[in-house]
Amino acid sequence: MRVLVSGASGLLGLNFCLRFASEHTIDGIVHSHVLTDLPFTVQSEDLTEEKNARTLIECYKPDLLVHCAALADIDACEQDPDRARFLNAELPGWLAEECEQHSVKMVHISTDAVFDGTQEGKYVETDATHPVSVYAQTKLAGEQAVRQVSYSAFIARVNFYGYSISGRHSLAEFFLRNLQAGKPMYGFTDMEFSPFYVLDLAETLMKGIEKDLHGIYHVTSPQSQSKYSFGVEIARKWGLNEELVSPRSVQEADFLTAPRSLNLALNPGKLEKALGIQLPSQQDGLDRFYEDYKDGLAQRIYNLNIE
Ligand SMILES: NC(=O)c1ccc[n+]([C@@H]2O[C@H](COP(=O)([O-])OP(=O)(O)OC[C@H]3O[C@@H](n4cnc5c(N)ncnc54)[C@H](OP(=O)(O)O)[C@@H]3O)[C@@H](O)[C@H]2O)c1
């Protein structure tokens, strides 16, 4: 299959491309990070330009578009709402229109942050959305733009962790780096989420594509935990000092610009039923994250030759 992946230098896009490069023909679109020595092609495009976005499908003629590009930094969205709107809200709609016109399957990556986090328990796909930040509002608008023009698009609401080119993009990397450096850090006890290891996410998305899923699915770990307990679990897995992770309330954090939803635990039951599988647990994900580290994946990603 010929797969076009936007955001191929990002945490999800890069891991997806590396995972499937030996099975499919992959073309990656990056923006500011031009990666080289990769097992797939990359091209740099500014996708805030409508004409660049609209010519992608015609140019690459993919069977599948996996759209990972976004302004995914929640605080950066608050500071530059116009950029957030172009990347998170407008761009998915332009791409979905082009995919429809050329009969190309689209996977659109959305977020758990479409919910306001006030509900008890895990969110299902039919629960009411109520975004509380510019990031969340623009991502929800992106979902809606895709749905408006495409019945066949597979829209995945996600939350994930893994190894990124900067070595500091995901929350797991934040904990790991500080733990390894012996630096104390905080973990929020009142923020609940369902993080999925990025390679489990990539493989689950591919299973959804093979089943030709369409519409909205929660593609997360079936369990949830607090950000604090996630940090402690990482310390335990690596045999590092868990005392370095201090419990703290997000209400005490003075360095966050954008408002955060407290409960972002999602229920992926609709997806498990559609795929006929049980998704990997939090423990399975953390075990794989650790094994991949020992096998050198983190270092290989950090060492990627960046121009
Ligand atoms: N990380 C999470 O836990 C999480 C949680 C919920 C939802 N999501 C969603 O998952 C998706 C992937 O997130 P991620 O964490 O992998 O993102 P990321 O690491 O921040 O990567 C973003 C990607 O978008 C590209 N990009 C940014 N501006 C662009 C532009 N003007 N033109 C073309 N490409 C541009 C970046 O390219 P360059 O780096 O080359 O500039 C990069 O490849 C996003 O839709 C995000 O909203 C992520």
Image (cartoon, rainbow, N blue to C red):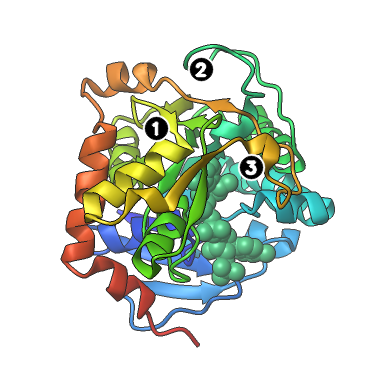
Residue 168: x, y in percent?
48, 64
Q: What amino acid is at disc 2? A: Tyr
Mark 3 Cα-neighbour bin, 10 Å: few <14, some 14–19, many ≥20: some
Mark 2 Cα-neighbour bin, 10 Å: few <14, some 14–19, many ≥20: many
Return the residue nearer the eye: 82 or 27.
Answer: 82
User: Which residue in the protein does label 3 denote?
Assistant: 97
**Mark 3–mark 1 contact, CB under 8 Å?**
no
Q: SS class of the residue under badge 3?
A: helix
Return the residue nearer the eye: 302 or 144.
Answer: 302
Mark number for residue 123?
2
Residue 293: x, y in percent?
23, 63
Q: SS class of the residue under badge 1?
A: loop
- State the CA–CA distance, disc 3 to disc 2: 29 Å
Mark 1 Cα-neighbour bin, 10 Å: few <14, some 14–19, many ≥20: many
Ligand 1 lies in quarter: bottom right
Q: What amino acid is at disc 3? A: Glu
Is 261 situated left or right of 297 in this image? right
Quick check: 257 above or below 120? below
At 29% across and 21% down in the image, what residue appears?
Answer: 272
Q: SS class of the residue under badge 2?
A: loop
Is 252 situated left or right of 7 in this image? right
User: Which residue in the protein does label 1 denote?
Assistant: 220
